[in-house]
């Protein structure tokens, strides 16, 4: 298939590109001229780069010159809080405006499917695993923009011959991740540097990157048999939660010596999420997808990677 991908130079997208190439798909990647492509440098010659901004003229030209079977939208701007007008603008542009432009061209040029990327932050927090029918209450402005586009995507599927789904991802982690808590802990342990963290009592659903990627692969396969005008939202996560404190313990054992992680030396942030888990029954039923990598295996693979990639 000819697949157009946004966000392919990011953490999830870079892993997905390499997996899709093994499936013999032809990958076209929308990137800015200034984008750093370090994560996909080993497959540069196997990917078709489309250098484009987010203007309607450039997106229209993109579709008039290329033919796509499907679109996978991973590009996003995440900010925990929106403190300036530019924060709002950047999230609106990437999370609503760009994918809406792609959708408008997709239905004009008979693109068969659209896979969108959502997040757990769209759900209201609950003491029980959330399902796709759980109450919605966006955690921040970022989550609100993701919800806004999901409504737009649903509109297009109802009114045009398109089939689509949104994968709501639960705490992806893995090699080449951004500077989030797990990579920070690993680097602290490997480099023997001190790191202050909270008490680490948060119970969260951490999902390893290869399992996340397989969810997209399974989605492409499933969509080929779905009828037009179909839209589904599917949660993608592990089957249980892990505390941050346990993650530190697992990674410390990987290093075979005491760490300098100072647990409890940092206060919880206001509005800290202390529990988030999901049911994956719908993913199992509609996609045939189940995660294969448990937290110990995933953290060991991450530790091994960063042990040999210390920059």
Image (cartoon, grey):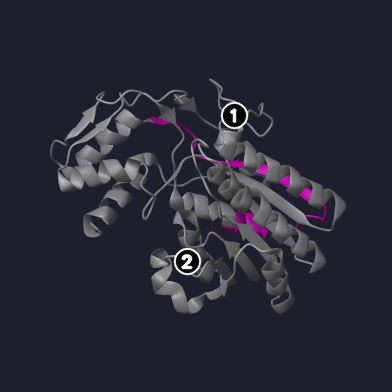
Where is the C terminus found, in terms of image quarters? Answer: bottom left
Please state which of residues 93 and 288 is positioned toward the viewer in this rendering. Answer: 93
Is label 2 in a helix, a strand or a loop?
A: helix
- Left or right of residue 89: residue 69: right
Q: Residue furthest left?
A: 257
Q: Residues within 10 Å of mark 1 (few under 14, many from 20)?
A: some
The residue range painted magenta reads: 217-242
Question: Which residue is at 48% across, 50% downward?
Answer: 211
Residue 12 falls within the magenta-colored stretch: no
Please state which of residues 141 and 278 is positioned toward the viewer in this rendering. Answer: 141
Disc 1 from disc 2: Cα separation? 31 Å
Q: Position of residue 303 (x, y in %)?
A: 27, 49
Question: Which residue is at 25% across, 59% downward?
Answer: 309
* Proximity of marks 1 and 2: CB atoms separated by less than 8 Å: no
Above or below 285: residue 136: above
Q: Mark 2 — residue?
A: 18
Q: Mark 1 — residue?
A: 130
Is label 1 in a helix, a strand or a loop?
A: loop
Q: Quadrant of residue 194?
A: top left
Q: Position of residue 104 (x, y in %)?
A: 77, 60
Which disc number belongs to residue 59? none
Looking at the rendered structure, the number of numbered marks drawn on it comes to 2
């Amino acid at each position: 298939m000819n697949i157009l991908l946004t966000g392919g130079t990011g953490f999830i997208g870079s892993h997905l590109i390499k997996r899709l190439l093994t499936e013999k798909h032809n990958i076209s990647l929308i990137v800015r001229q200034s984008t750093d492509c370090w994560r996909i440098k080993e497959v540069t010659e196997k990917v078709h780069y489309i250098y484009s901004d987010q203007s309607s003229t450039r997106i229209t030209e993109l579709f008039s010159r290329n033919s796509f079977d499907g679109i996978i939208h991973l590009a996003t701007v995440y900010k925990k809080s929106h403190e300036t007008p530019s924060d709002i603008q950047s999230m609106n542009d990437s999370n609503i405006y760009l994918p809406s432009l792609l959708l408008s061209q997709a239905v004009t040029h008979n693109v068969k499917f659209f896979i969108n990327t959502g997040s757990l932050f769209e759900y209201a927090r609950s003491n029980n695993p959330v399902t796709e029918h759980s109450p919605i209450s966006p955690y921040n402005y970022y989550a609100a923009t993701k919800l806004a586009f999901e409504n737009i995507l649903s509109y297009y599927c109802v009114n045009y011959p398109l089939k689509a789904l949104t994968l709501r991802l639960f705490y992806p982690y893995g090699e080449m991740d951004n500077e989030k808590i797990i990579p920070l802990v690993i680097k602290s342990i490997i480099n023997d540097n001190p790191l202050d963290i909270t008490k680490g009592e948060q119970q969260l659903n951490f999902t390893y990157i290869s399992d996340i990627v397989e969810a997209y692969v399974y989605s492409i396969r499933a969509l080929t048999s779905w009828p037009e005008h179909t839209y589904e939202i599917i949660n993608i996560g592990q089957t249980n939660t892990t505390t941050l404190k346990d993650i530190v313990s697992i990674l410390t054992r990987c290093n075979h010596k005491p760490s300098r992680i100072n647990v409890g030396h940092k206060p919880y942030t206001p509005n800290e999420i202390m529990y988030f888990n999901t049911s994956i029954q719908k993913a199992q039923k509609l996609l045939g997808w189940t995660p294969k990598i448990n937290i110990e295996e995933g953290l060991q693979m991450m530790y091994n990677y960063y042990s040999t990639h210390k920059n």
